[in-house]
Amino acid sequence: AIRKLNKKFDGFRLFAGVECDILRDGSLDFGDDVLSELDFVVASIHSVFNLSEADMTRRIIRAISNPLVTILAHPTGRLLLKREPYVVDLAAVIDAAADTGTWIELNAAPKRLDLDWRWWPRAKEKGVKCVINPDAHRAERLQDLWFGIGIARKGWLTKNDVMNCLPLGKIEDAIAGKKARQ
């Protein structure tokens, strides 16, 4: 259906994507046969938060090493005032994201604000791109994007560092470039 809409409307582009779960061993809960049909894949952890730092780091790096993964979402899993971030070597994860061309989400939901602003200068230095996501599960939460913009600015990011601030052609080129690494 998405492909048909894109053909029907000139100057309009809707991307086909999915958020999939990073399983305990770093594999994904969708097979590569499904993921390869999509424009982008967001990988994130939603369970098993109590691994050692080494195991959690290996888990995330294995997931983003899958060439079909485009974005790592809420990379520390924190929920402010509710759940501490899981222990993970974020420097190693950022380095792996740079090596694999994986973008990192800046989750703008006030309950997350993940990845913390203190990590964005390192990510930027390594060439890792940001994707600001309001994590809106309802239309009125789309406004949370502004929190993400504030965090991005605090982390010294510019519009050129944020994928969803780029013109459509540059986004398409970046997605194609990521797919070419497969």
Image (cartoon, rainbow, N blue to C red):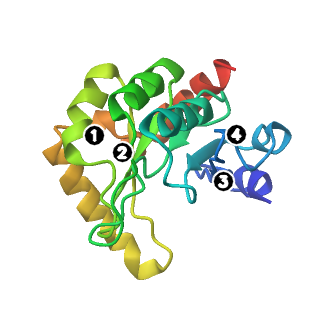
Residue at 46%, 41% in the rendered image = 52
**Vertical arrangement, residue 127 with respect to residue 80, above or below:** above
Residue contact at pointers 4 and 1, CB within 8 angstroms = no
Mark 3, residue position: 18
Residue contact at pointers 2 and 1, CB within 8 angstroms = yes
**Vertical arrangement, residue 91 with respect to residue 110, above or below:** above
Whichever of callouts 4 and 3 sits on the residue coming sooner in the sequence is: 3
Q: Which amino acid does label 2 sit on?
A: Cys
**Viewer-side residue, 35 vs 177:** 35
**CA gap, disc 4 and disc 3:** 15 Å
Whichever of callouts 2 and 4 sits on the residue coming sooner in the sequence is: 4
Q: Where is residue 173 in the image (x, y as percent from the top left)?
A: 55, 28
The label shown at residue 61 is none
Label 3 or label 2, whichever lies nearer to me, is 3
Residue 16 can be seen in this image = yes
Quarter location, residue 150: bottom left
**CA gap, disc 3 and disc 1:** 24 Å
Q: Is mark 3 on a helix, strand or loop?
A: strand
Q: In this view, does 129 lie to the left or right of 73?
A: left
Label 2 or label 4, whichever lies nearer to me, is 4
**CA gap, disc 3 and disc 2:** 20 Å
Q: Is residue 51 left or right of residue 18?
A: left
The label shown at residue 159 is 1
**Viewer-side residue, 170 vs 57:** 57
Quarter location, residue 64: top right
Whichever of callouts 4 and 1 sits on the residue coming sooner in the sequence is: 4
Label 4 or label 3, whichever lies nearer to me, is 4
The label shown at residue 27 is 4
Whichever of callouts 2 and 1 sits on the residue coming sooner in the sequence is: 1
Q: What residue type is labelled 4?
A: Ser
Within 10 angstroms of label 4, few (less than 14), some, or many (20 or more) residues? some
